[in-house]
Image (cartoon, rainbow, N blue to C red):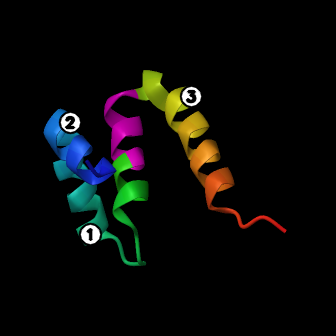
Amino acid sequence: MRTALWRILLAPLTTLRALRLQRLSRSPFDFDSAWRQARMHCAPDEVEYLFQCHLQESEARQPEP
């Protein structure tokens, strides 16, 4: 399953908040960033986990030289 689908199923309120943030932002805002920001607001104790996950994903996206 895709990450977005897991997020919708397991955290529907956070997903709705993320969609609202994404819709109301003036600049382009992807769903993943909006979801993480919404999650930080409603569950601040998970900030370290979200940050660590973000670092791992950004390292995986970098092309190897």
User: Who's the residue at 50% across and 36% down the image?
Assistant: 50
Which mark identifies residue 32? none
Q: Identify the residue under disc 1.
A: 24
Is mark 2 in CB contact (under 8 Å) with mark 1?
Answer: no
Q: Main secondary structure of the magenta part?
A: helix
What span is in magenta?
36-43
10 or 60, nearer to the observer: 60
Label 2: few (<14), some or many (≥20) within 10 Å? few
5 or 14, nearer to the observer: 5
Q: Position of residue 52 (x, y in %)?
A: 60, 35
In this view, the mark in front (2 or 1): 2
Give SS at disc 3.
helix
In the rendered view, tell whether residue 16 sits above or below residue 40: below
Give SS at disc 2.
loop
In this view, the mark in front (3 or 1): 3
User: Who's the residue at 19% across and 34% down the image?
Assistant: 10
Q: Amino acid at mark 2?
A: Ala
Q: Position of residue 19 (x, y in %)?
A: 22, 60
Q: Identify the residue under disc 2.
A: 11
